[in-house]
Amino acid sequence: MAIYSQILANGLMLGALYACLAVGFSLVWGVLNVINMLHGSFIILGGYLTWFAWHGWGIHPVVMLPVVGAFMFALGYALQKTVINRVVSAPVLTTLTLTFGLDMILYNVMTYWFTATPRRVQLDLGSVSLGPVTLPVDRLVGTGLALVLTLMLYLVMRGSNIGRAIVAVRMDRSAAELMGIRTERIYAITFGIGALMAGVAGVVFASVFPITTNVTGTYLGKAFVVCVVGGLGSVPGALVGGLVLGLVESLAGHWFGPQQAITAGFVLMLVILLTRPTGLVGVRGYE
Amino acid sequence: MSEPILRLEGVSKTFGGLKALTDVSFALEPGEVVGLIGPNGAGKTTLVNVVTGNLPPSSGSILFEGKDVATQKPYEAARRGLARTFQIVQPFPQMTVLENVTAGALFGGGAGSVGDARDMARESLEFVGLAPLADRPAAQLALAARKRLELAKSLAMDPKVLMLDEVNAGLNSSEIDGALALIRRIAERGVTVLIIEHLMKVVLSLSKRLLVLHHGRLIADGPSAEIVADERVIEAYLGHKFAARLKERHHG
Amino acid sequence: MKSGPLAYALLAAGLLVLASTPLWADNYVVRTAAIVAMYGALATSWNFIGGFTGYPSFSTAAFFGLGCYVGAICQHAGVPMMLAWLVATLMVGAFACLLGAIILRLRGHYFAIGSIAVVEVCRLVVSSWSSLTGGGDGLNLPLLTWAPEQVMRFFLFVMLGILVLSLIATALVDRARLGFGLRCIHQNEDAAAMVGINTTLYKVAAYTLSAVFCAAAGAAYASWTGYIDPTESFQILMTVKVPVMAMLGGAGTLAGPFLGAAAFVLLEEVFWANFLDWNRAILGVVIVLLVFFLPGGLLSLARKAKAKANSANSGSGGAA
């Protein structure tokens, strides 16, 4: 039984990180109907900024959270406003290709400046034991931060005017426009928030996983899976999707080996796609 | 009397808890022109969707030429000769008018080759009076012409039963007159026509028999003249109070 | 699809240039020509599902990679090379047929994601099934014992052969009811069903056609390089690059995907040679520019120029 408590704990911790990783991607997909292929690179960019601030100037990652968040929001807002908005209502082939092209540029810039060497912010916080379960503190803190950040986004979406406007645009764009909501601005803000969440997820990840451009695709893949499993465009959806994926990977890793953990995630996604395309908590599908 | 070409027996359709159709039964004789009327939300379009396989019925059977087709797919309905038009027209927007109709002839009308289908399509366009616009992209047509295109496409499929879902919605009165004349000519070719309308005037000028749907139930089925005098029908259309007042006036 | 005489001329010229490279150029050029032919076949394949049918499929790398592996495993088991290619083509075709019946129920973004996931799942399964595939270590194949130029020439003609077959298939489908039906599905799938098109069957046919030439090219590629591994065989980059090539030339046209592949591969070669550190970013810029300024592809430029010339002519002829 002890081994399963550990697996459960690992799965939930991983799941919280996945939720934080995917929530911005989910929001952009749900509201703009754009699959943002840049998302994985945004996460790594956030991670690099954190690492360089830590190693260059000794700035603690927690301090970097708002800095990276603000920077990524500005980057995302500008990118949507100037580039992506021009094709925002085009078919998926166009928008996906465009964001893939942009990702190739960002990826190349990052690999050139930072090289592909894996880097990690080592906080050396030790670990704590709860009965049979051992938890590394850095990962525990990361999980806590991920949950807090995701919850904050939820509160913003629920409580603020901007959040309500985003939800209105997601539900029915033309009705929202009739109510006087400027959808173009909402799109830019949503994309900004998507980038912000990717960036802060990167800050959190920097102290948990090695940061390298080699894993941008892996993170993007996780975001796909979380979105499809949980359902698009909502914070609870991303949370459920993240936790389910974390648990499934953790269990599959234990039963079939670490390589199969990733396969299990994708298989889960394909099954959900075909049986419940709106996701586990999704209300409305987008075609 | 000959065997009915289309017969519905106890057809129901529910969406979740919502009953869109309840125990609907009727039959169409070959060559008949029948009107299906009812207020908005009565379930008229749902009924057509069930008959053409767009929605599976929750219960009941649908017999086309004596064969149960309740589980058919839309493309099977089209090939059998059950054609329809949509309330909101559904052209292939980037294709020309001719290509649109050719698609109907090729896949629904059983044309042997693309060339044959094109010839059939030309005939069909001639019939509805769209031949001069044959090479225009469908997306460029005005509403009345787009409705005619739908008709031409359906005709090219050589239908036995044609269901026209609100073909007159959004047209002005002279356009409606043109459409009515066209529907009459289609009926003269021996096609069984079911006209779905909420404008009584239109239906009355075309069909001798009416079906009335209200809250998903078939509340009347009979000769047009009787149906329009039927209290329940008037009530369904005009509301309870108005119907009562009308009755008083008649008696008074 | 209106493939004018210009498209046919460009197509014939392109094929002729590729086929004649051994006569006038060095091995590097012949190799590039073979790569162009291979990507031309992949892009022409993709065109069936992406161009004709309008389904944003990103499965190309799955079919290519499976083709590599089925061919390599057959050759390992002693099957003669050409027969191994045929087996790979048929098996991957059958796989695509079954897979298509399942995932073609999805539309739009969901289909796009599902088709990408197929590539990842294939890669992961191949790399963990070590007993059959050699896992992450990859597989070695028997190399041809001819002179290097001969080997190069041989694979150039093999790739050209696959490309020409895919082009012939495109031309045939284009004229037949299959092509007509696929274009109807592209425009409005519900309306297509209502005119009597068995949309599921047609889409599965298109998806299968989009797989077989990729599988053949993959199997031949494996024999050519003599070594394959999961990362090289199932590349997400390839799976996005191939649709981009088709769009660069003109998706849904006969010659477009091949011309787009040629332009793309040549650009890529130039960037690799001159800007090693920045080649990926430059390709990214090319993609972004393509999306903004050339959404109809290179062939649409030619068509526009022709339309302009025509309207200029009729304009001078009178106010018609």
Image (spheres, coloured by chain):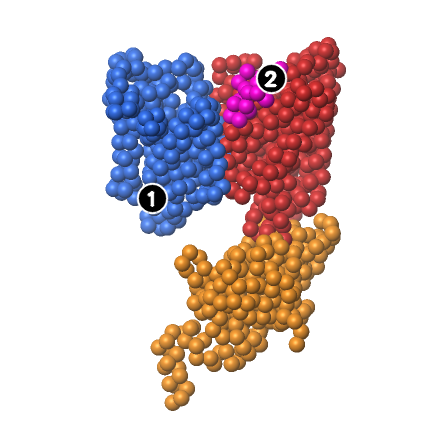
Chain B shade? orange
Kindly report the distance in space between the C-alpha atoms of the residues bearing marks 2 and 1. Answer: 51 Å
Q: Residue at x 60, y 42 (%)?
A: C203
Q: As displayed, is residue C119 above or below residue B247?
A: above
Q: Residue at x 42, y 19 (%)?
A: A213
Q: Which secondary structure lies at badge 1?
A: helix
Task: Give neighbour class at mark 1: few <14, some 14-19, many 20+ (Cα, 10 Å).
Answer: many
Q: Amino acid at mark 1?
A: Val
Check contact, mark 2 vs mark 1: CB within 8 A.
Answer: no
Residue A120 placement (x, y as % from top left): 34, 16
Q: What residue is rendered at 54% in x and 13% in y? A: C274
Label placed on residue A167: 1
Residue A199 in sight from this viewpoint? no
Residue C171 is one of the magenta-drawn residues: no
Residue topped by disc 2: C139
Query: Which segment is the magenta one?
Result: C124-140
In front: label 2 or label 1? 2
Q: Amino acid at mark 2?
A: Leu
Give the image location of residue A242, x and y in percent: 37, 33
> Counting other residues with Cα less than 10 Å from the Cα at mark 2, is it few (<14), some (14-19), or many (20 or more)?
some
Badge 2 sits on which subunit? C
Camera-nearest residue between B12 and A179: B12
Is residue C133 on the magenta stretch? yes
Please name whichever residue, B82 or A192, is drawn nearer the observer in this view of the structure: B82
Q: Which image quadrant for residue B5?
A: bottom right
Instruction: Give the prevailing secondary structure in the magenta stretch.
Output: helix
- Residue occupying the far bottom of the picture: B252
**Measured from the top left, where is residue B162 in percent x and y?**
61, 64
- What chain does badge 1 belong to? A
> Which residue in the rendered view is the most extreme toward the top?
C147
> Can residue C32 be spotted in the picture?
yes
Chain that the image shows in blue: A
